[in-house]
C-alpha cells in the first residue's frame, strides 16, 4: 500500500503550508511528516512510498542548511515530488538542484512544482508577495495534489519531468555576517525569536546577541516578534529589499512540471 510522506524546511511556514495543501488534495493523511527546519532527521523510505519534499528558495538556490539536513534521508527507488517555494522573484536553479539532490539520495522524481510564498525580506513599507501563500495558492496546491493522486492511481508516473534550471547552478550569494539587530528598548525577552531560529544563531541567555556567521537571513525572528524589536539595519539589505519591491511586485503564479 502506498504511504504518503512529507519532508519540509520552512522557517516562516510558507513551504509547510504549501506541502499541507498538496497532501490534503491527495486525499490521505500522511504516514510521516519530517520537519528539517530545526534539526536533521534519519528516515528510510520503501519503494512503494511516495515522498513530497517542500523547501524554500534563497537567492535562486536551495539553502545549504536545508540541503545538509536532507542528507540522512534515503529512498529505495521511492517516488518523489519536489516543490520549491520562492518569494515572487524567480526560482532560478533551485528546483533543478532539489531534483538532483533528491535523486542522489535514492528517490525517483515524478513531478515538480514551484509555488510563491511571502518573501523573507517583505516588510510593512516594502511588501513582497505579502500574505502568500494565499487562498488561491492553497487552492492550486490542493488541485496539484488531486492531479498527483490521479496520476499515481492510474500508473501514469513513468518518465522524468522536464524541470527548468541550469547546470552548473548559479553561484550562491557571497556569505556575510549581516543579521537582524535587536532593539533592546523594545525587546520583552519572550525568547520567541530563539525558538524559531533554524540555526541556533540567537543567544538564549541574551537574545539581543546574534551570531552573524550562523544567520541564514530567513527572517523568522523578525516575523515572529510581536513588538517589532528585530530588524535589519544594514544599508545593503535595505537596498535589496527596496529593489525586490520595485521590480518584483507583479503577482507570479505557481508552475507545475510532469
Image: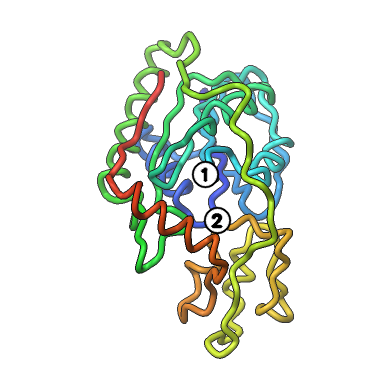
Q: Nearer the viewer, residue 3 or 78?
A: 78
Q: Which color mode does the image show?
A: rainbow
Percent of width and height locating residue 206: 71, 81
Q: Which mark is residue 11?
A: 2
Q: Secondary structure at mark 2?
A: loop
Whichever of callouts 1 and 2 sits on the residue coming sooner in the sequence is 2
- Residue at figure coordinates x 47%, y 81% from the top left: 227
For mark 1, what is the residue? 56
* Vertical comparison of 207 with 218: above or below: below
- Residue at figure coordinates x 69%, y 34% from the top left: 73
Q: Nearer the viewer, residue 240 or 120?
A: 240
Q: Secondary structure at mark 1?
A: strand
Q: Quadrant of the C terminus?
A: top left
Percent of width and height locating residue 28: 41, 36
Examine the rendering and report whether any part of residue 31 can be seen.
no
257 displayed left or right of 136: right
How many C-alpha atoms fall within 10 Å of the one at disc 1: few (<14), some, or many (≥20)? many
Q: CA distance from mark 1 to mark 2?
A: 9 Å
Q: Tell me, yes or no, whether the two marked residues, 1 and 2, touch with CB atoms within 8 Å.
A: yes
Q: Nearer the viewer, residue 11 or 119?
A: 119
- Residue at figure coordinates x 57%, y 20% from the top left: 48
**Quadrant hosting residue 143:** top left
**Quadrant hosting residue 208:** bottom right
* Vertical comparison of 45 with 123: above or below: above
The number of numbered discs placed on residues in the rendered structure image is: 2
Amino acid at each position: 500500500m502506498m504511504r504518503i510522506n512529507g519532508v519540509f524546511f520552512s522557517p516562516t511556514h510558507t513551504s509547510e503550508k504549501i506541502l499541507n495543501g498538496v497532501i490534503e488534495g491527495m486525499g490521505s493523511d500522511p504516514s510521516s511528516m519530517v520537519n528539517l527546519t530545526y534539526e536533521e532527521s534519519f528516515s528510510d523510505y520503501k519503494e512503494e512510498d511516495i515522498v513530497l519534499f517542500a523547501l524554500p528558495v534563497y537567492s535562486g538556490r536551495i539553502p545549504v542548511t536545508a540541503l545538509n539536513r536532507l542528507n540522512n534521508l534515503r529512498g529505495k527507488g521511492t517516488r518523489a515530488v519536489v516543490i520549491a517555494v520562492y518569494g515572487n522573484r524567480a526560482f532560478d536553479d533551485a528546483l533543478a538542484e532539489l531534483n538532483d539532490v533528491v535523486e542522489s539520495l535514492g528517490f525517483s522524481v515524478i513531478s515538480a512544482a514551484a509555488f510563491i510564498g511571502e518573501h523573507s525580506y517583505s516588510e510593512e513599507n516594502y511588501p513582497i508577495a505579502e500574505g502568500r501563500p494565499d487562498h488561491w495558492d492553497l487552492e492550486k496546491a490542493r488541485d496539484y495534489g488531486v492531479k498527483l493522486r490521479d496520476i499515481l492511481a492510474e500508473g501514469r508516473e513513468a518518465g522524468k519531468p522536464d524541470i527548468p534550471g541550469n547546470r552548473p547552478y548559479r553561484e550562491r550569494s557571497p556569505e556575510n555576517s549581516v543579521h537582524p539587530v535587536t532593539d533592546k528598548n523594545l525587546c520583552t525577552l519572550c525568547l520567541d525569536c530563539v525558538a524559531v531560529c533554524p540555526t541556533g544563531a540567537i543567544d538564549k541567555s541574551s537574545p539581543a546577541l546574534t551570531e552573524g556567521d550562523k544567520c541564514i537571513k530567513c527572517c523568522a525572528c523578525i516575523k515572529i516578534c510581536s513588538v517589532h524589536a528585530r530588524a535589519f539595519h544594514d544599508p545593503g539589505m535595505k537596498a535589496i529589499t527596496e529593489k525586490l519591491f520595485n521590480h518584483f511586485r507583479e503577482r507570479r503564479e505557481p508552475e507545475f512540471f510532469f
